[in-house]
Amino acid sequence: MANEGFFEKVYQVAKLIPYGRVTSYGAIANYLGAAGSARMVGWALNGSNKKEVPAHRVVNRNGLLTGKHHFQGTNLMQQLLESEGIEVVDNKIQNFETLFWDPMKEL
């Protein structure tokens, strides 16, 4: 599959997101030199459930839990974030700007 290499790079970046922090699909895409490929990052993370990837730490550019329907159960993504001390209200990360981890700046 042609996307396999890209998906692996997405997983490697996602594994570096610190506990208690979040990033966006677009931030990962930009870091990988694939601006405009946020949706592809989402597809990669959707298939990451067997790879020990903290996909719950990746949200949309506004801090919304847009990928939550890919987690088992109705609130698993939110529960995982809250277990790391991240407050979620109405499917939105609170203090998103403060918690945002930008791989372009951090790596």
Image: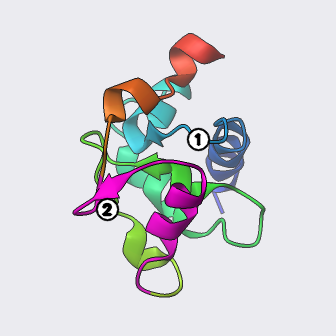
| Residue type, mark 1 in image | Gly
Task: Examine the image and state in which quarter residue 53 appears.
Answer: bottom right
Report how far apart the C-alphas of labels 2 and 1 lie in the structure: 18 Å
Residue at the far bottom: name it. 73
Residue at the far right: name it. 51
Q: Where is residue 87 drawn, in percent x and y?
A: 39, 51
Q: Residues within 10 Å of mark 1 (few under 14, many from 20)?
A: some
> Is residue 44 visible from the viewing direction of this image?
no
Q: Secondary structure at mark 2?
A: loop
Query: Left or right: where does residue 62 sit relative to residue 84?
Result: left
Q: Residues within 10 Å of mark 2 (few under 14, many from 20)?
A: some
Q: Is residue 102 above or below residue 105?
A: below
Q: Nearer the viewer, mark 2 or mark 1?
A: 1
**Label ID, residue 66:** 2
| Residue type, mark 2 in image | Thr
Q: Nearer the viewer, residue 13 or 95?
A: 95
Q: Where is residue 51 drawn, in percent x and y?
A: 77, 64
N-terminal-most mark, 2 or 1: 1
Which residue range is magenta in the image? 74-92
Q: Is residue 75 magenta?
A: yes
Query: Left or right: where does residue 104 sit relative to residue 94?
Result: right
Which residue is disc 1 drawn over?
20
Q: Is residue 41 magenta?
A: no
Residue drawn at (51%, 27%) of the image: 101
